[in-house]
Image (tube, rainbow, N blue to C red):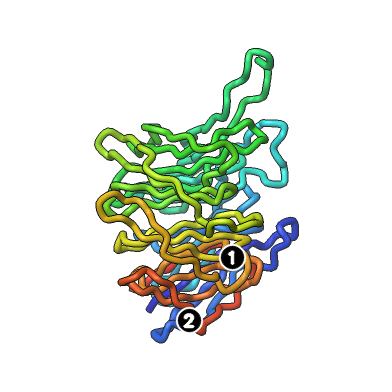
Amino acid sequence: MMYAYVGCRTSAWRGARGKGIEVYQVLPDGDWRLIQRVESVQENPSWLTLDPLRDRLYALHGDGDVVAVWKRNQESGLLSLLTQQTTGPRHAHPDLDPQRRNNPVGAALTSDGQYLLIANHEAGNISALAIDQHGLQPPHSLARIPGHPATPDAPDAPESLSRPHEIVFAPGSDLFAVPIQGRAAGNGIDMIRLYRWHKGEAWLLDEIRLAPGSWPRHVDFHPSGKWLYCLSELSSTLTVLEVDAQRGALRLKQTLSALPEGYPTRSDASEIEVHPSGRFVYAANRGHDSIGVFAVDAQEGTLSVIDWVNCGGKTPRFTTLSPDGRRFFSANEESDTIEVFDVDVQTGQLHRRQQTIATPSPTCICFASAD
C-alpha cells in the first residue's frame, strides 16, 4: 500500500485555497482516496520531507518560521502532530518583507540521517536541526549565504544576503547542492553552491555564479552523481554542471532554454526532475503551463529537447515522479489539481491519464509505503 502526502498553501495573502496537509491512499489501480486533512501549525505547509527511519513527516511553512513534526502511522498512513520547532533567526536587512518571515522553502535529511537541513529563503541561510526522540532540536548551525559586499561609497550598508531555494544531496553522498537566488532586497547573488556535510556542519566547497536576475530555483542530481541540473526561475533556463565529487568542484557544461524557441510572454520556471533511469530530465514552466521533456546524453550529461507537454492545468508549481519512475505528477497550484501522467520509460514521453486529483493550492507531494 502506498500513501501520498500533499502540502498546500493556505494563506489569504497568497490568495490560497488550501486547508493544510492532505493524506491520500494510493489504490492499486492508481486512484487516490482522501483519508485525512490536517490543519497546519502555521499557514502554508508548502514543503514536506519524509523521514522513513522514524516514520515522520517534517512540514515547512512558507512565509513562516517554524517546522512542524508529524508522526506517521505506517499502517494507516495517518498523521498526528508531535511538536514544532523554529527554523532559526530572521535576517535584519531593512528591505526584507516582514510578511515572509524566514520563508523556509526546502529541506533535506542529511546523509547520516541525524539532521534536518532547512533552506531559509528570506533569512539567507541554511539551518541545521538535530533530530531526537522528541522531534527536532533548535538550530545549532547556520550556513549564512551573503550577497555582494558593501561598496566603498556605502560602507555602512546593511549586511547583504542571497536566498537559498532548495537542498539536494547527491546519491549516496555527503555532498549537497543549493540553488541560490540573487534578489534585489539584500543585494544577492545568483549562484549554485556545493557543500559537504561533515561532523554536524555544512562546509562550502565550490560555487558557480549564473546570470544576474536568473534566480536559480531547483536542482537535481543525475543518479550517477556525475552531473547536476539546475532550473532558473526568471530566465527559464536549464543549466548542466559537471560534478567532481573527489575535488568537491562544479564545472559549467551547458545552458539551454526550458521553453520553446520564440515563446513571447512571461513564464516562470518551477521544478526539475531527473528520471531514475538517468535518461530524461523534466522541467516545469508556470505561464507556458508545460512540462519540458529533455533527453540526457549518456556520455556527456548534456540535454536535448524531446517535447513540451501541457501540464493539464494552471501554474505547475511542483512536480514529482512515482518511486518506480512510471508516473509523473504535476501539482497545478492555480487550477487546484494534481494531474497524473504515464511515463514511457523508453522515450521519456509523458502521456496524460484520465485522472485528476482535486486538491486546493497544491505545492508539494511525497510518497511513503505502508511497509
Instruction: Tell me the kind of residue under disc 2.
Output: Arg
- The residue at which mark 1 appears reads as 289
For marks 2 and 1 on the same chain, the one whose residue lies earlier in the sequence: 1
- Residue 116 visible in the picture: no
Q: Quadrant of residue 357?
A: bottom right
Q: Secondary structure at mark 1?
A: loop
CA separation in Å, label 2 and label 1:
17 Å
Q: Say few, some or many: other residues with alpha carbon within 10 Å of mark 1 (under 14 / 14 to 19 / 20 or more).
A: many
Image quarter of the N terminus: bottom left
- The residue at which mark 2 appears reads as 353
- Residue 81 visible in the picture: yes
Image quarter of the C terminus: bottom left
Residue lying furthest bottom: 29
List x then y, in percent, for residue 287.
Answer: 63, 61
Residue located at (55% from left, 80% from top): 356
Q: Secondary structure at mark 2?
A: strand
Residue located at (43% from left, 73% from top): 350
